[in-house]
Amino acid sequence: MPDRGRSWIRAPPEWGVEPVPKEARILRGIDLFVLWSSLGVGILVLQAGALMIPSLTLKQALAVSLIGSIIGSMLLAAAGVIGARHGVPTMVSLRPVFGKSGSYIATALNVLQLVGWTAFELKVMAEAAAMVAGGAKLTIAWLIAFSAFVALLAIGGPLAVVRQWLEKFAIWLVYISTAWITYQVLKAPAWAIEGGQGGMPWPLALDLVIAMPISWMPLISDYNRFSMKPSSGFAGTLLGYTAANTWFYALGAALAALAGEEFVAASILQLYMGTLALIAILVDETDNAFADVYSSAVSIQNILPKLRQWKLVLAVTVISAVLAYTLPLAEYEWFLLMIGATFVPLFGTTLSEYFIVRRGQVELDEFYEKAPRVAWRSIVSWAAGLATYFLLVKYMPNLGASLPSLAVSAALQAALGKARK
């Protein structure tokens, strides 16, 4: 007779707010290259690149894509070092900097933006799939199907997704399909178009590019905590995300110039064998939504550690799917800039405290029982950087806002830390 006290299906392991044990830190540099190059591609990234056209020329868009990707990816990879060294998720990694209660502010903002990102991902996937098969009347059916699959990936966890889903299947589809789209675009006359129409200063376009890797900073350690070594995690993240983000922003701009469609998936469908290429990208797009849903659950556990991840995964997925049904893509550019406004100065403060003030000397118990309740000097530095961002966007948009706000928060945190000593 079967043992009724034992489950027939073994549940996947869950890593919440506690540090990942050494034996589970198994991801190599190449694994993280695959993960972050996969998270750096997708229809939403193409859509963001398309926003630069027709304001910029294609040459300008390519330059902005490369520079912004390098800057943003370096910041992203540096933030991941904290999790890789200590085995902690991102929101927990903020506790020595902002205090335990202080980290709850960032957690709430992070969950808010992750639910929004998930809704965007599900909406884009459902609408693109409906273009390929079924038409608008099947959009909701595709939305339900993608939501269910994303929830299953998130319940499975990062190790299973990287080793079993991405490396064995999904990433190869997206590499091949993107290479094909790029080949088709390069054959077309889009690259001969000169003379942007203006309307978006290039520093603002740079902010738009930097916003994408920055948007992953609140998630980075949720995955890089599984890295075998901090150095290999840094290199894999930097190279993987820089390559993918540059490629997709530039390709999105080129598709917009070539086809002139508002929705970039429609531009892909106009290419030779574009339907197959779009299907392949849709398959890989699920990992972006997976990361958003999984990290939402892990972030909530920073505040409510006893809640089970799988229950949180299901709740976040359902809420995001409901939002996706009514969310307008017209607000996408604003959404990206607001993410940059919040998290650029936050991680300017964090990186300054960790690498400059503390010089990496943080003990594990400072993430837990010895974490301060609230670190007000860090809150002040974050607020100063946030104010800098909004003021520049409103009154001096031609200067850009991401790098100045990061510099203000980092410099102030270093100065306050030195004064405290």
Image: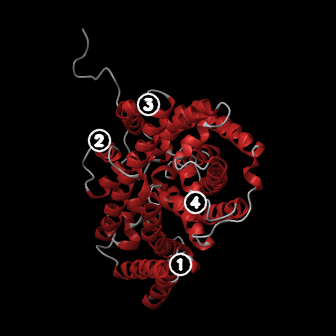
The Cα–Cα distance between marks 3 and 4, rounded to whole angstroms, is 40 Å
Task: Of the two numbered discs 2 and 4 on the same chain, state the one appearing first in sequence.
Answer: 4
User: Which dot, 1 or 4, sits closer to the camera?
Assistant: 1
Amino acid type of the residue tagged 1 in the rendering: Pro
Name which residue lies at 49% across and 52% down.
Answer: 225
Element under disc 1: helix
Amino acid type of the residue tagged 3 in the rendering: Gly
Task: Of the two numbered discs 3 and 1 on the same chain, state the one appearing first in sequence.
Answer: 3
Q: Residues within 10 Å of mark 3 (few under 14, many from 20)?
A: few
Task: Of the two numbered discs 1 and 2 on the same chain, state the one appearing first in sequence.
Answer: 2
Q: Is residue 163 above or below residue 202?
A: above
Element under disc 4: helix
x and y percentages locating residue 162 in the rendered image: 53, 39
Do labels 1 and 2 touch, CB within 8 Å? no
Task: Of the two numbered discs 3 and 2 on the same chain, state the one appearing first in sequence.
Answer: 3
Which residue position holds label 3? 135
Q: Is residue 314 above or below residue 200?
A: above
Name which residue lies at 51% across and 30% down.
Answer: 132
Q: Is residue 310 visible?
A: yes
The Cα–Cα distance between marks 2 and 4, rounded to whole angstroms, is 31 Å
x and y percentages locating residue 125 in the rendered image: 46, 39
Which residue position holds label 1? 397
Amino acid type of the residue tagged 4 in the rendering: Ala
Q: Is residue 17 visible?
A: no
Which residue position holds label 4? 77
Task: Of the two numbered discs 3 and 4 on the same chain, state the one appearing first in sequence.
Answer: 4
x and y percentages locating residue 250 in the rendered image: 66, 54
User: Which dot, 3 or 2, sits closer to the camera?
Assistant: 3
User: Which dot, 1 or 2, sits closer to the camera?
Assistant: 1
Tell me where residue 267 sits by quadrant. top right
Which residue position holds label 2? 318
